[in-house]
Image (cartoon, helix red, strand yellow):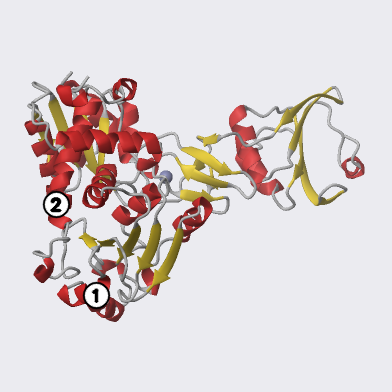
């Protein structure tokens, strides 16, 4: 938490900081993970980043992400980091990497793919990470990041 | 173990028992060559090695040719077939999921062949049961037994695959048979000529794959002179419904009519293939041309399917 821009937003006692999201992606990320309950959510967009020029950042009070949520966040960009905060301290950093497979968190854009007809857990084999290119395990269609709809 | 199969790779033969045949992408080159080799032995092997075996043929969309070919194959192996030829008579018409259908049908049979209009359906079927599942065509995606019989035909007609110059003619954009065959030929050292109207070019993804594996190819709009010097011309039907403008269709339809007039131009070696049914792409006047291979190609389908069924049901172990 050394990045200067982070001090512009509320300090977090317990929760999660999602940092280095690609600029403009914070609202999309928030859509994936939801934000119900009365907990504070701080969103920073187009913050200056020494490493990447611009970035988005989200602070979630009293919330730790589950695996499915992390998998969805991973799809948004290659540099995203997750820090779990307890009592104002970073107690864990979680890697936000796309694995060899993206499962259950995105729908196939092919309307005649069986996964859009029967109630099935989707699976995509990752062919390339950045830019993201995956192959649907079922219809075998190659899908780009823009076409992949995260649910 | 029959004499004819004594010298095949036994471990590999065992590895096919219970295996699903869903997509050519699932198979390594060695496995494809193994399948072709076993199929070749089935040319002369006529024994009913699967007595009492039941094949369930689930045809959620009609495909008479594929269905009859599988029925012939299992019956020649001494087994029998049950199933349906059209979704209208199955409980899917009543909204049953594919998973449920397969779970019910698996109790009736030893292996399943499925033809379904949705892409990925065969994979779902395979994941729903321990029984071997063979994909008989899943929408626009794959039709692996067609691909294998095409490769088998190429090798049988030419005694090899490596080193051949292969042309593809017609609808290269939507043609599933072409996509699977082009994709599978990426394992081999071949040269390709892609002949199609501009609007029906081979998809960029496949062209990129050809580039990445180092297969040299060129694109053409006219049959001649592109087809001159080829070893194989794989022709396909251009489907009228693909064209937004019917005038475009009429124009290309007549351009891609292969008949005897091209023979003096194309050289002695040209073998003509077609997955059938043909409409106007190949004139009947070519049927008695010795290298018109499309009916032999179709007949090879039964041989290849006999070999596949025997392998996945352990009939030659
Ligand atoms: Zn799909």
Q: Which chain contains the residue that carries disc 1?
A: B
Q: Which chain contains the residue that carries disc 2?
A: B
Label located before the other in sequence (1 or 2): 1
Asked if residue B302 can be seen in this view, the reply is yes
Q: In which quarter of the image is residue B18?
A: top left
Q: Which residue is at 61% across, 40% downward?
A: A32
Crowding near the residue tagged with mark 1, few <14, some 14–19, many ≥20 C-alpha atoms within 10 Å = some
Crowding near the residue tagged with mark 2, few <14, some 14–19, many ≥20 C-alpha atoms within 10 Å = some
Looking at the picture, does residue B252 appear above or below residue B18? below
Looking at the picture, does residue B178 appear above or below residue B90? below
Q: Which quarter of the rendered image does ligand 1 occupy?
A: top left
Residue B84 vs residue A106: left or right?
Answer: left
Comparing B219 with B117, the one in front is B219
Asked if residue B123 can be seen in this view, the reply is no
Residue at numbered disc 1: B253
Comparing B84 with B314, the one in front is B314
Q: In which quarter of the image is residue B51?
A: top left
Residue at numbered disc 2: B296
Distance Cα–Cα, label 1 vs label 2: 25 Å
Q: Is mark 2 on a helix, strand or loop?
A: helix
Of the 4 image quadrants, the one containing the N terminus of chain B is top left
Q: Is mark 1 on a helix, strand or loop?
A: helix
């Amino acid at each position: 938490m050394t990045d200067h821009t982070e001090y512009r937003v509320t300090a977090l006692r317990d929760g999660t900081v999602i940092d280095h999201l690609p600029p403009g992606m914070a609202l999309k990320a928030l859509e994936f993970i939801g934000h119900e309950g009365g907990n504070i959510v701080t969103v920073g967009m187009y913050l200056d980043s020494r490493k990447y020029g611009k970035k988005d950042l989200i602070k979630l009070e009293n919330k730790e992400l589950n695996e499915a949520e992390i998998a969805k966040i991973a799809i948004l960009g290659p540099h995203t980091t997750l820090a779990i905060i307890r009592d104002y301290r970073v107690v864990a950093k979680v890697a936000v990497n796309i694995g060899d497979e993206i499962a259950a968190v995105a729908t196939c854009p092919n309307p005649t793919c069986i996964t859009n007809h029967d109630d099935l857990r989707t699976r995509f084999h990752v062919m390339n990470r950045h830019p993201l290119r995956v192959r649907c395990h079922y219809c075998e269609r190659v899908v780009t990041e823009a076409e992949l709809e995260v649910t | 173990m029959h004499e004819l199969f004594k010298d095949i790779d036994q471990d590999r033969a065992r590895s096919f028992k219970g295996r699903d045949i869903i997509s050519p992408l699932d198979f390594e080159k060695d496995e494809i060559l193994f399948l072709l080799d076993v199929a070749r032995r089935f040319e002369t092997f006529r024994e009913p090695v699967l007595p009492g075996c039941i094949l369930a043929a689930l045809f959620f969309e009609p495909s008479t040719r594929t269905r009859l070919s599988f029925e012939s194959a299992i019956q020649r192996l001494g087994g029998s077939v049950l199933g349906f030829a059209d979704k209208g008579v199955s409980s899917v018409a009543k909204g049953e999921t594919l998973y449920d259908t397969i779970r019910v049908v698996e109790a009736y049979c030893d292996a399943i062949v499925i033809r379904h209009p949705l892409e990925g359906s065969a994979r779902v079927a395979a994941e729903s049961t321990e029984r071997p599942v063979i994909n008989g065509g899943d929408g626009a995606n794959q039709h692996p037994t067609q691909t294998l019989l095409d490769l088998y035909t190429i090798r049988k007609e030419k005694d090899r695959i490596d080193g051949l110059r292969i042309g593809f003619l017609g609808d290269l954009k939507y043609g599933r048979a072409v996509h699977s065959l082009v994709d599978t030929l990426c394992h081999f050292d071949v040269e390709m000529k892609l002949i199609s109207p501009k609007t029906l070019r081979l998809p960029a993804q496949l062209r990129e794959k050809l580039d990445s594996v180092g297969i040299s190819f060129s694109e053409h709009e006219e049959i001649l002179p592109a087809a001159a010097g080829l070893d194989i011309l794989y022709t396909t039907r251009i489907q009228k419904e693909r064209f937004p403008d019917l005038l475009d269709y009429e124009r290309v339809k007549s351009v891609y009519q292969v008949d005897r007039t091209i023979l003096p131009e194309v050289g002695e070696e040209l073998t003509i293939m077609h997955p059938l049914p043909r409409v106007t792409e190949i004139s009947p006047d070519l049927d008695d041309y010795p290298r018109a291979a499309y009916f032999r190609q179709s007949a090879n389908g039964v041989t290849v399917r006999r070999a596949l069924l025997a392998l996945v049901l352990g009939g030659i172990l």
